[in-house]
Amino acid sequence: MNTMKKTFIPLLVVGTALIASGCDQKAANNTATPAPASVVNKADAIAVVNGKYISKETLANLEKEIAVRSQGQAVPKEKLVEELIQRELLVQDAVQKQLDKSPEVLANVEDAKKSILTQADVQNFMKANPVTDAEIKAEYDSKVGGTNATEYKARHILVKTEAEAKKIIAELDKVADFAKLANKSSLDAKESQSGGDLGWFVASQMVEPFSKAVIALEKGKYTTAPVQTQFGWHVILREDSRTQTPPPLEAVKEQLTPFLQRKKLQTMLENLRKQAKVEILVPLTDEKPKAEAAANANPAEAGQPVAEEVIVEEVKDAKGKTVEEKVIVEEDLVEDKATAQESKTEARVKPAAESKPEAATKPAEAKK
């Protein structure tokens, strides 16, 4: 039973931690390249394997790593020590077989080195350029605190033709129930039976003709003429409005800080790119045959109105820090994919961010 426990830990952590500890210059005794005996003293070691010392610092780093991976769950120290001993045995065995000189291993070591240097440079930059309270306050005033926008609560009935919309308006003039008409006739409410409810939203979340019509209406009034958008013809009922109260600075400070850190890092990377000589040697997109591209084209996607929105994102790494070594490069790719996917959705209008669960059945945001 004891032997099984000792072989279980490496299966959990050796896959990733071995690379990290193996490339750490501070834990040189764990690398494939032999290190001077003076790097780790016996007084600073937890164990010695065939004359090679394993440092206390290496154990402390592993404890931190395991704590993150197991979400704070403690692992007995004897298991962690045994894990490090087994790693050292594997490293020594690999060196004896001269695997440290193989092209595959050398390439992996170089990749790991680049990854570590990337993280080190990002962390060094963030340490030298911390986000100040003044910068947080300025960002808050610009993007959050000064946005005392009006929110609207409305319902709508969406139909395909102007004639259908006019017929619905005529029924409303005869004191018909708006919600019941929406459930019966609206393209957006037939299935959801939501009565065309859009919840609370700001005008910028809707396509322009729709938002202008809502703003122009009085509370409790509906449009007396159909409103046309790229999605069809709308009859709109404005139920209420209110002033949007921004959250206090302290409530969003933790979200603004990583956002500003990323802006600083983005600026630094842009400056490095401007100063560098870069030549891209491969095509960046896969060209599709013209016939296929034409078949997949959606004319309705062209020229749609743009809804401006400020989004504050909180980004943290696996250890809870706000620094990511690859976030700037990878984020743009992810956002491009998300935008491409969203543009294919048969959207109507964008639901408010604070809408209720039933908002999932309401019209989606008009795409930028």
Image (cartoon, rainbow, N blue to C red):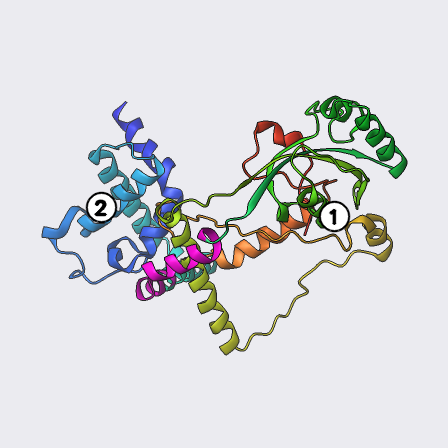
Q: Which residue is label 2 attached to?
A: 60
Identity, as a three-letter code, of the amino acid under mark 2: Ala
Identity, as a three-letter code, of the amino acid under mark 1: Pro
* Residue 137 visible, this angle: yes
- Where is the N terminus found, in terms of image quarters? top left
Q: Is residue 185 above or below residue 271?
A: above
Residue 128 falls inside the magenta stretch: yes
* Residue 325 visible, this angle: no
Of all residues, the one furthest to the left in this rendering is: 43
x and y, in percent, of residue 236 in the image: 73, 36
Q: Is residue 221 left or right of residue 17?
A: right
Q: Residue at x 34, y 34 (%)?
A: 70
x and y, in percent, of residue 164 in the image: 87, 33
Residue 78: image quadrant is: top left
Report the disc number at residue 209.
Answer: 1
Of all residues, the one furthest to the right in this rendering is: 163
* Magenta-colored span: 122-145
How crowded pointer 1 is (Cα within 10 Å; few <14, some 14-19, many 20+) is rated as some
Q: Secondary structure at mark 1?
A: helix
Badge nearest the viewer, 2 or 1:
1
